[in-house]
Every structure is written in structure tokens, then in C-alpha cells.
Amino acid sequence: MARRPQADAEFFARHRLAELEAWDDHALEAAGRLTTPLRWHADSDRYLPVSWDQAFAGIAAELQALRRDDARAAVFCCGGQASTEAAYLLQLLARLYGNNNLCSASELCQEASAVALPLSIGVEGGTVTRKDFAQTDAIFIFGQNVNAADTGFLHDLQEARKRGVPVVSFNPLRERGLLAFTAEQVPRDMLTPARTTVSTQYLQLRNGGDLAALTGLCKAVLALDDQAQAARLPRVLDTPFIARHTQGFEAFKAAMRASSWQTIEALSGLPRVELEQAAQVFARARNAICIYGSGLTQHRQGVRHVQMLVDLLLLGGHIGRPGAGIHPMHGHSNAQGQRSVGLRTAPGHTLRHRLARLYGFEPPHESGLNLLQTCEGMLDGGVRAFVGLGGNFLREVPDTPRVEAAWRQLRLTVQIATRLRRSHVLHGASAWLLPALDATEIDRQSGLEQALSSEDATGRVNASRGAASPASAELLSECAILARLAQATLEPNPRVPWQAWAQDYSRIRDAIAQTWPEDFQDFNGRLRTHGGFLRPRPARQRLWHTESGKACFLGQGPLEAEPATARDDDPVLRLMLLSSDEQSGSTVHGPDDRSRGIRGGRRVLLLHRSDIARLGMAEGQLVDASCAIDDGVERCVRGLRIVAYDIPPGSAAGYYPECNPLLPLARHGGPASVAAAKAIAIRLRAMPR
Ligand SMILES: Nc1nc2c(c(=O)[nH]1)N[C@H]1C(S)=C(S)[C@@H](COP(=O)(O)OP(=O)(O)OC[C@H]3O[C@@H](n4cnc5c(=O)[nH]c(N)nc54)[C@H](O)[C@@H]3O)O[C@H]1N2
Ligand SMILES: Nc1nc2c(c(=O)[nH]1)N[C@H]1C(S)=C(S)[C@@H](COP(=O)(O)OP(=O)(O)OC[C@H]3O[C@@H](n4cnc5c(=O)[nH]c(N)nc54)[C@H](O)[C@@H]3O)O[C@H]1N2
Ligand SMILES: [Mo]
């Protein structure tokens, strides 16, 4: 059998980094697994092998020197896959080092929820569990491409459709996964058109039109309630729930009534009747679930979008009862679990107090840099060092060319990784690459195979362990790397047992349980039960951990077009960035997007036929796209191929990461670090032949 390619010492001896810079992401991925710790040498422009001891000592010396200048100049960035245990070690390392610079690329999907939901209903995640799907009467899906969902969810959705549960989708694209289950997904006995249909109603709104669409939906629900009252029929609103459990209803109702259908139609791109039909489905449902994804959150108004969706559910009392609730569907395998154990930039009084008590130090108060602030910090020189646990930073962030240039000026880049990425090939003055075991590989410490935990979108915490033998004998686990890096960098603290933690992860879980007893008491015991355990989400019991102790109507406010459209004679399009089914996060596995019928490469721009004609362009033509926001920076992506597509007029779609350079860092979701990737104002220019 041919040996699998490996990005080993021999590979790096053959390739200088200046050469690897020209390789595309596929080629870097195909180089294979990283096998040995590496340090970049300026003289030869190569990554050369070092021992683990040399690596930890070298990095520690850099980090210590930097800290003497400014402890805030280093950032600790986590990819969405890292385990809960590793995330706990990373947050403690950062705080003992002296800052809260704990960012994660999964902020780009999660953060709007993490800001909105605590204010609205006092929890950080959704309220739905898988059981609820078996009891629901209606499902509404906003901005989620269910093709990207896990198979468990697809199964639940299918079962719901078998029971005849209506599914109403709000999406600018007619996504195949939202239209019909595919033949592979559906058992033979279900292959009738009625049973394979996913969405019973499809509202093809403008991207960026969700606030208007949700306003229309709520307005129509209120009108149906008026009609029911007039006809002495049962109310549509759950008035006992609203009176007992919520705050702000009167102001919300007044705002919905005051908004005009004309504005709603213009901004959402949806006719009033379609919204009224959807409102009827909602009004008839005893128990409704609202699901949403990045299509709803990646906007400047992303936080409000989530709040409006909660408001809609509150009207019918659909939070905190079986078969109903709100269900954010984003997040890498463990983005939620990482937050749960303190991977956040503002730790809050309780966490600081507990860390202080457990580990005998004063955790930093000042809020740390989130993902977008980290990019800004690289641009303005405040950030000097980057320590990354997984991820592929440069392929995930907006304004890529600017951030890449700043990245090269960093004093230190340290990356814990499994395969070679562009973010490793570009590097700081002192650059280290530390190869880790991946989740499929056996992780043996002190003779015992270790398990790691993660938390899914419903708050279920599960254990997993790898089964394959490691790609190289030199690999260390992420927990071991972090523990040894911490020991090398920080002054000794007998209360922090780094070594014992790295030898036995159940002790890390004990520490997590001591830090958050309300969520994680008996962590090890409960993890052993089949299927793991559900972390408490008080809103499920109608306990509202908000300031007022109630669930809050918060979404109302002025309706504005997003992005604000320029003059009529200036043809600005609203670009949404998408991922294909053939990519996972920043890693693109294939050149096509079969489910959307796109072949022959990802450098495309999907446009409505009327726009192609209006702009005097033709299908297949190559164009340059530039960002229409004028802030003195030129942002351009060249050579995109025009594809006619079923998309609302005025909208455009392209792929991540190819089109990330069009997205300005400063365009984000207000208090949340969510880049506004779903409605970027762009202009097109035909490419000179
Ligand atoms: N195969 C695969 N699966 C994955 C991932 C992966 O990388 N690969 N990533 C996982 C992760 S981390 C995440 S966050 C999820 C992401 O899953 P999604 O949230 O589904 O991801 P996107 O590709 O961003 O697609 C967003 C959807 O929103 C729609 N949309 C765009 N703009 C708007 C808008 O303004 N309003 C509305 N209502 N809809 C809009 C798009 O048409 C698209 O259907 O997928 C997860 N699953
Ligand atoms: N271009 C682009 N950018 C995006 C997105 C996108 O779809 N495209 N999606 C956005 C969203 S929704 C999210 S959640 C984030 C996701 O951002 P991240 O959480 O950073 O996830 P990925 O992009 O999947 O990058 C994961 C990287 O980790 C490496 N890796 C895999 N397993 C392991 C492991 O066990 N250990 C270590 N150390 N490394 C491992 C993989 O090789 C890969 O390079 O990105 C956001 N940014
Ligand atoms: Mo995500």
C-alpha cells in the first residue's frame, strides 16, 4: 500500500515558504498531516524540525518578552473543533498570562445569538431539544441551508414532514435541501412528491430583508388575533403567557402596528399575501419551532434579527413548552462547549471570582479582543503575537488582503494544527507549527486512552474518543501541548496542576465542574451515561435569567434597507457569501457545488437574469466585483464568472473564502462580532479582454 503523503521534515526541506505561498489550499491540504514540531528559519525560508522541548522553550521566551512590554499584545484564538477540555486550558493560559484575548472564528456565526438570546430570554443557546421535533406543529427556517445540517436533524425533519407538519422557509435562494429530501435521504416507502417536499411554503425574500419580513409576520399575527377576538374565536396570542412571563409587549405591538405594509414589502421583497399566509400557519400551530442559521445572523442587524425571531415566538408562548422553541443551527462541532467553559472575551464577575478562588490569582478585568477586534489590532499594530488552536485564520476573516499584510508583521505566530494551511505559510518573525493529534486518533496518556467532550446546539454534552493510530509518533494531544506551553511560559503556580491535567483529562473535567458546578457537577459521571447529558437552559423551564426576570420583546425599531441602497442610477448589488456543501468551514474539498448546480469552479457570481441584462452583461462573462462602501480602502475580487440564478433581483451570491476580500472588517453586527457577510454592497465592472 502506498504511504499517505505527509507534511514531514522531508517535505519542508524540499519547499521554501515563498514557494508554498503560491500553492492553493487544495495543494497545501494534499501535502498531508503535519508530523513534527517546526520552526521557521529566516536564512533558508523553511520550516525546520525542532524538539518539543526546544519549541516550548523558544515560544515561552518570546511570550515572556512580549508580556514585559504589554500583556495585551498576544491573542489566543480557538477553532470551532477544539474540545471543551482544551478550551478550558486555553482560557486559563490566556488569563494567567494576563488578558482576555480569547477569540474564535465561530463568533462569525454564533455571536449574534450569544448577544441576543441572553438579553431576550436569559440563555446563550437555543431552547429546543431533539424531542421537541417529535411534538411540534410547525417549523420556520430562516437563513439555514439544511444541506449543511447533521443527519440527526435531517431525520427529525423528515419525521416531522411524515406527520404532515408544515415547514415554512425564508431564504433568498431556492436551496435544494429546503425544497425536497434527496433520494438517498428518503426511505423508499416515502418517495411520493408530498412526502419528499421539505418546505410547504417558500418565501424568497431579499437578502438583508429579514427584519422587514419578521415585522410583517408579527404584524399579520397581531391582525389575526384581532380578527379572532372580533369573531369571538380562541385568541391567537398566548395572552396569559405574555402577561405572566414577558416584558415590553405593548411597545412591541404598537411598533408592529405602526409599520407600513408598503415599507415591509419593499424591504423584504415579499408580497403581503405571502407573509399573511405564513402568519396563518404560525397562528394555527399549537407548538412552533423557529430554526435559523448564518443567513439570519451575518448582518449588521443580526442581533435584532434574532431578537425579532424570539418576539415572534413569544407572541404565541412558544418558548418553554414541549414541541416549541428557538433553535440556532450554527456552530462547529464544539463552538458552544468552548463558550460554556469560559472561552469569551468578557469573563464577568462570577467567573473571575471562581478562577481567583480556585487558582489563587487575579484574573484580568479588561475585556479582551474578539475576532474582528483582533484583526483591527493586527492592522494597528497593537496585536503582536498570535497563538492559534486549530482554525485557518487568514481564510476565515474579512478584508483578507489587509489582514494578511498585517499578519506578516506579527512578532510571533504559534499554531497548533493537524494539516498545512495558508495561515501557516504566511507567518510572523518568529513562527512555530505544533502538530496535534486529530479527533479520529487514539489519545493515550499515562497508558490510558482519553476521551474528550463537546456540546451541540441543543446543549447536549457528549464524549468521544479516537480509534485510529496516530499519523506520527511525535504528535502530542492539544491538551498536552497547551499544558506544556503553559508550564514553560508561566511562573509556577502549585494550584494549577498542568501536568496532572495533561495526564488525565477527567481531572480537567473535575476542574470544569468546580468552576461551574451549576452546569457541570459530576461532569465525569454524567458523561459516562449513554448519550451524555443536557446542560441546563433555564428558559426551557420558563425561568428567565434576564435583568427583569422576564422574557423581553426587544426586536422593534426602525426598518432600514440593508445595505442602504445608493442612488437608483448607481447599480449597487447586495452580495451574500455562501459556503458550498463541498467545503467544511474554510477547507474547500471540491471545485463544484453540486446541490446548487454550480460546476466549473467557485469563482462565480450568481445574479438574477434581469440584473445581468440591466447591467449589459452576459452569462459566462468574467467581471471584477468591488465593494461599494467608500472608506478609502479599495476592495476588489477579479475574474468572477457570471451565472444566471434563481435569486431576487438586486441580490448576488458568491463563495467564502474567495470573496472574503470584499467584506470590510468594520461592517459587522454592532455589539456582536459577526461580519455582515450576507449583504455587502458591491459594484461590477466587465473585465477588460
Ligand atoms: N458541509 C458543511 N456543513 C457545515 C459546515 C461546513 O462548513 N460544511 N459548517 C457548519 C457551520 S460552522 C455552520 S455555522 C453552518 C452554516 O450553515 P448555514 O447557516 O446554512 O450557512 P451558509 O452557507 O452561510 O448559508 C446560509 C443560508 O442563508 C441563506 N441566506 C443568505 N442571505 C440571507 C438573508 O439575508 N436572509 C435569509 N433569511 N437567508 C439568507 C443562504 O441562501 C443559505 O441558504 O453549517 C455547519 N455545517
Ligand atoms: N472562508 C470561510 N470563512 C468562514 C466560514 C466559511 O464557511 N468560510 N465560516 C465561518 C463560520 S460559520 C465558522 S463557525 C468559522 C469556523 O472557523 P474554524 O472553527 O476555524 O473552522 P474551520 O474553518 O473548519 O477550520 C478548522 C481548521 O482546523 C483544523 N483542524 C481540524 N481538526 C483539528 C484538530 O483536531 N485539531 C487542530 N488543532 N486542528 C484541527 C483543520 O485542518 C482546519 O484547518 O469560520 C467562519 N469563517
Ligand atoms: Mo459556524
Image (tube, rainbow, N blue to C red):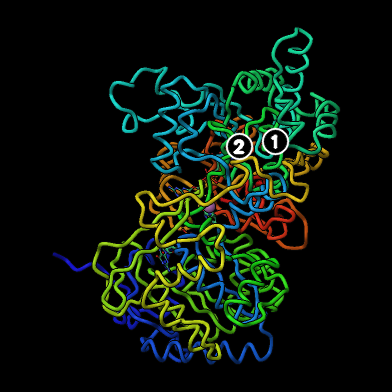
Compared with 215, 590 (above or below) is below
Q: Which residue matches tag 2?
A: 320
Q: Amino acid at mark 2?
A: Gly
Residue 409 place in picture, x, y as percent: 61, 80
Q: Residue at x 52, y 38 (%)?
A: 643
Q: Nearer the viewer, mark 1 or mark 2?
A: 2
**Quadrant where the N terminus lies?**
bottom left
Compared with 229, 435 (above or below) is below
Residue 43 place in picture, x, y as percent: 45, 92
Q: Amino acid at mark 1?
A: Gly
Place residue 83 in its image quadrant: bottom left
In the displayed orientation, state which residue is furthest to the left. Answer: 1
Q: Residue at x 65, y 20 (%)?
A: 283
Compared with 323, 666 (above or below) is below
Left or right, 668 with respect to 582, comes to right
Neighbours of disc 1 within 10 Å: few (<14), some (14-19), many (20+): many
Q: Secondary structure at mark 1?
A: loop
- The label on residue 209 is 1
Q: Residue at x 55, y 25 (%)?
A: 138
Place residue 81 in its image quadrant: bottom left
From the viewer's side, name the closer residue of 224 and 615: 224
Residue 75 place in picture, x, y as percent: 60, 75
Counting residues from the N terminus, which is met first, the one under dot 1 or under dot 2? 1
From the viewer's side, name the closer residue of 504 and 387: 504
Compared with 452, 436 (above or below) is below
Left or right, 646 with respect to 258, comes to left
Q: Are marks 1 and 2 in contact (CB under 8 Å)?
A: no
Q: Is mark 1 within 8 Å of ligand 1?
A: yes
